[in-house]
Amino acid sequence: DAGITQSPRHKVTETGTPVTLRCHQTENHRYMYWYRQDPGHGLRLIHYSYGVKDTDKGEVSDGYSVSRSKTEDFLLTLESATSSQTSVYFCAIMEGNTGELFFGEGSRLTVL
Amino acid sequence: DQQVKQNSPSLSVQEGRISILNCDYTNSMFDYFLWYKKYPAEGPTFLISISSIKDKNEDGRFTVFLNKSAKHLSLHIVPSQPGDSAVYFCAVSGSARQLTFGSGTQLTVLP
């Protein structure tokens, strides 16, 4: 158990509203990631962090921002949600040097 | 341009038989190759990995094969069990500490 908690687990919102998803870890890992999962696309990297206040863009970063003010928390923000951002969002941490990720249970977001 | 491709969206296998899941990649510079399993309403879980310097890694019923010349990765499950029914994602990792995933293959093991 990598001690990853995502909140909220489910959210329904309307187009144009801001949304923030939170990822919390208890084991002081340096690397944290946000992925989205969509049918036919697998898991796509949105943003990742390699330390406090150190973040970088992934493959599908448009429309998303992130912040990491503490080691244990990595926030994903949709400034103005769109229907194309309806998805399941997964947070992950990396252990070791072999690329092994441990994932949270996911946050299902529906944008109407 | 997809760096990792899983060309079979689904696979059905009889219980007790072998399941073979395939994955192709485009970049020779990846260091590690991984397989993840995902059940509905849960996060993906790590299954098995292989370093680029090896061509086979085994863990119980699961074996991963790496063919670097063909840029091809495969996962063998023997014998397959109904509890193995899940979506399987292959992933590749390079020096940037980022994982790139394939689109997934839904494995159904029939009792």
Image: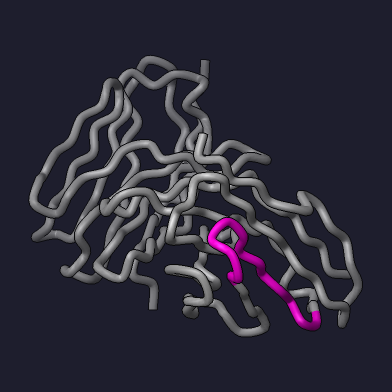
Asked if A38 appears above or below B22 in the picture, the reply is below
> Which segment did they paint magenta?
A68-80
Q: Tell me which residue sits at (91%, 73%) in the image.
A: A14
Left-right relation of A47 to B60: right
Judging depth in this view, the residue of B12 and B85 nearest the camera is: B85
Residue A67: which quarter of the image?
bottom right
Question: Residue B66, percent across and down?
Answer: 17, 48
Residue B76: which quarter of the image?
top left
Quadrant containing the N terminus of chain B in the rendered view: bottom left
Q: Is residue A79 magenta?
A: yes
Asked if A70 appears above or below A95 in the picture, the reply is below
Asked if B76 appears above or below B97 in the picture, the reply is above
Left-right relation of A21 to B42: right
Left-right relation of A50 to A104: left
Left-right relation of B45 to B3: right
Question: Residue B99, percent across and down?
Answer: 38, 61
Judging depth in this view, the residue of A70 and A31 nearest the camera is: A70
Residue B97: which quarter of the image?
bottom left
Q: Tell me which residue sits at (28%, 59%) in the image.
A: B24
Judging depth in this view, the residue of B71 and B99 nearest the camera is: B99
Q: Main secondary structure of the magenta part?
A: strand
Judging depth in this view, the residue of B33 and B68 nearest the camera is: B33
Q: Is residue A31 magenta?
A: no
Question: Residue B42, percent across and down?
Answer: 62, 40
